[in-house]
Amino acid sequence: MTDMNRVEVIIDGRNFTIIGPENEEYIRDLAYFVDKKIRSLAAKNDKLSQTMAATLAALHIADELYKVKEELDELKDRTKDPLEKYNKVYKELQKAKEEILSLEEASQEYKESLSTLNKERDELIKQVEELKEMVAFKDEEIQEYKEQMQLLQDKVFNSQIELIETKKELAEYIRLLEEETSDLEKEGI
């Protein structure tokens, strides 16, 4: 059982002993509030007895309490929907956090994959550059071979011309030789 506090207060000039679980300051504030209400009503109408002033004060306090209770109930009703929405939004937020975490993990995997692919790309670029250099070198060799081949073709062409001329000369010598041989045979030699 909780400890009960015993507090002496004065309401409308009379002493009261209040016993309750609330702290002394709270009880004194309540007593002061009730005393102030009674004195305010009594000051406005000096024909009121103490009992009537206390009853009217109780009625005013009950009115304030009733209005505050209605306002509280209305606020509770108005906050019910936002609280339900809050719970829904909270669940969506948790779900979104999980999805973000999942996406961050996937993003990390993609980053690692991208890093690996970038390294492979760099290696391929390096190989392509090496192959380009090799192709350039081979192109130079091909050009040199083409030039040598052109020179050889020119030599072959010149050799063919010389061969043709030599064949012509040889044919001419053979013809002349045959003429001389035929002349010699005619002469009987």
Image: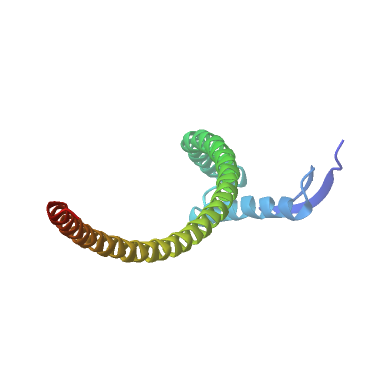
Report the number of discs: 0
Q: Nearer the viewer, residue 179 or 45?
A: 179
Q: How is the image coloured?
A: rainbow
**As drawn, is 142 to the left or to the right of 68?**
left
The structure residue drawn at horizontal position 68% and vertical position 51%, both measured from the top left corner, is: 31
The structure residue drawn at horizontal position 48% and vertical position 38%, both measured from the top left corner, is: 82
Q: Nearer the viewer, residue 171 or 156?
A: 171
Q: Is residue 33 visible?
A: yes
Please state the horizontal and vertical placement of residue 44, each as a whole percent of the image: 49, 55
Q: Is residue 42 above or below residue 76?
A: below
**As drawn, is 156 to the left or to the right of 169?**
right
Please state the horizontal and vertical placement of residue 18, each as a whole percent of the image: 78, 45
Q: Nearer the viewer, residue 137 or 88?
A: 137
Q: Nearer the viewer, residue 89 or 146?
A: 146
Please state the horizontal and vertical placement of residue 156, each as a whole percent of the image: 30, 60
Q: Quadrant of the C terminus?
A: bottom left
The structure residue drawn at horizontal position 75% and vertical position 53%, both measured from the top left corner, is: 9
Q: Is residue 14 visible?
A: no
The structure residue drawn at horizontal position 30% and vertical position 65%, both measured from the top left corner, is: 155
**As drawn, is 184 to the left or to the right of 9?**
left
Q: Quadrant of the N terminus?
A: top right
**As drawn, is 150 to the left or to the right of 31?**
left
Please state the horizontal and vertical placement of residue 98, each as a whole percent of the image: 59, 39
